[in-house]
Amino acid sequence: MTLKTSMDEGKTWPVSRVIHEGPASYSDVAVARDKSILVIYESGNSNWHEYIALARVNLSWLMEGNR
């Protein structure tokens, strides 16, 4: 599962970070009150539907190595 961001309203998507190396599927993204980025997604080790995962990251982590 890769989280990507755009700084130009979706014209380009140059920033990306992997949040799960294995199989993954449907996801949803939200921003918490503290401005952290929440990603809930289907995931697993062998199949994409083994469990539901929640990743919590911040913008500085997402931007790391992409500047």
Image (tube, grey):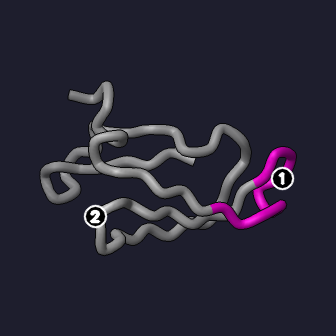
The image shows residue 66, relative to residue 22, as above or below, that is above
Q: Quadrant location of residue 54? A: bottom right
Residue occupying image coordinates x 38% and y 60%: 37
Q: Which residues are magenta?
A: 44-53
Viewer-closest of 39 and 57: 57
Secondary structure beneath dot 2 equals: loop
Marker disc for residue 37: none
Residue type at mark 1 is: Asn
Count the labels in the image.
Answer: 2
Residue neighbourhood size for the residue with mark 1, other residues' Cα within 10 Å, grouped as few (<14), some (14–19), many (≥20)? few
Residue 55 horizontal/vertical position (percent): 54, 56
| 50 magenta-colored | yes
Secondary structure beneath dot 1 equals: loop
- How far is mark 1 from mark 2, CA to CA? 31 Å
Residue type at mark 2 is: Lys
Residue underneath mark 1: 47
Residue occupying image coordinates x 35% and y 42%: 62
State which mark lies toward you, 1 or 2: 2
Residue neighbourhood size for the residue with mark 2, other residues' Cα within 10 Å, grouped as few (<14), some (14–19), many (≥20)? few
Q: Earlier in the sequence, mark 1 or mark 2?
A: 2
Q: Quadrant location of residue 45? A: top right
Residue occupying image coordinates x 39% and y 71%: 30
| 19 magenta-colored | no
Residue 19 horizontal/vertical position (percent): 54, 44
Viewer-closest of 64 and 7: 64
Q: Main secondary structure of the magenta part?
A: loop
Image position of 34 (left or right of 7): right
Residue underneath mark 2: 35
Q: Quadrant location of residue 26? A: bottom right
